Image (tube, rainbow, N blue to C red):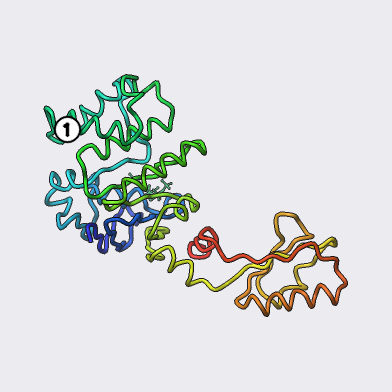
Amino acid sequence: MSLEVSQLTKLYGNQKALDEVSFSATPGRILGFLGPNGAGKSTTMKVITGYISANSGVVSVMGKDPVNSPKEVSKLIGYLPEHNPLYLDMYVREFLEFSGGLYGMSGQTLKSRTREMLNRTGLEPEQHKKIGQLSKGYRQRVGLARALIHDPQVIILDEPTTGLDPNQLVEIRSLIQEVAKEKTLILSTHIMQEVEAICHDVVIINKGKILASDSLSNLKSGVNEVQLILETEEELQLEWFENIGPVTFGSKGTSEVMISCQDATLGRKAVMNIVQARSLNLISLNQSKKNLEQIFREITR
Ligand SMILES: Nc1ncnc2c1ncn2[C@@H]1O[C@H](COP(=O)(O)OP(=O)(O)OP(=O)(O)O)[C@@H](O)[C@H]1O
């Protein structure tokens, strides 16, 4: 494990922002760190990077801890904070060279590493522009390039795609996937589609506590429940279906119901019996496995 977090507790005054948080991350796999607003994601990232200290617990980054070895840990970690602080008056290349300098890089090493980062993040055409002139997507690229300039082994990205348009989103996601091939990468987010699109492992945190920590596929396969979605020409009543499983109206209103059930075959039979017995005119009966969003809502409810 290149990153291990064990029993972290962090108090802000009387408020427990982190309550014995433990998880680990592996090279070559993207870990999605998921939680609703205020769950403790940023606090965890700040403790790992050594920006703040925890009240108790241990962080190990490639065997070093940020409290006793802050300099070593800062060299091992590349961090893109939530609001991506940049110097808007600096030119892109100048900013990256400046950032590399902060890690003790200089001369040809710094120049060639800057060139490599400009190339990998697609920033070459923009390198002579001021950061303040760039679009949000390109500013995120600058933030990523800055986080990677010193070739860190562990990369932590706090909500890196928030506010990007769909094209920029796809580009930044594929850049993240590319970067993650040889590194340990943690992606903090509350966007479920993002996790489903690019993460291998998932940690779910809520109110400072870890509620799930597993591979994405295990998390999804552990849920056997399916959802049946029935649409008819007539208006439906929820109580007709309550014996089958928890039921709500769908997005189409009272002519569509969504029923959760453990056994899809039995569920479909029961629904069709009701359709027949009540002489309903069927438009469609569909079935879907739960997605991460539904799993997340159940776990964090
Ligand atoms: N400096 C601080 N002082 C006091 N309370 C804080 C401080 N920073 C965070 N908190 C509180 O700690 C809790 C966890 O906050 P944190 O920013 O870690 O959550 P988050 O999961 O990153 O949320 P978001 O998705 O909204 O960014 C919240 O209740 C927040 O209000």
Q: Which percent across, then down, holds residue 282?
A: 81, 65
Q: Please name whichever residue, 14 or 167, is drawn nearer the observer in this view of the structure.
A: 167
In the image, residue 69 lies at what x, y percent? 12, 49
**Secondary element at tag 1:** helix
Disc 1 CB within 8 Å of nearest ligand 1 atom: no
Residue extending farthest to the bottom is 266
Q: Which residue is pictured at 75% across the width and 68% down the height?
A: 238
* Residue located at (53% from left, 65% from top): 298
* Residue 132 visible in the snapshot: yes
Residue at 32% x, 27% y is 124
Question: Residue 101 location, x and y as percent?
Answer: 16, 30
Residue 49 spot, x, y in % from top left: 24, 47
Q: Give the vertical position of 244 relative to 9 (above or below).
A: below
Q: Split into 4 quadrants, where in the image is the N terminus?
A: bottom left
What residue would you read off at disc 1? 102
On the question of residue 12 being in view, the answer is no
What amino acid is at disc 1?
Leu
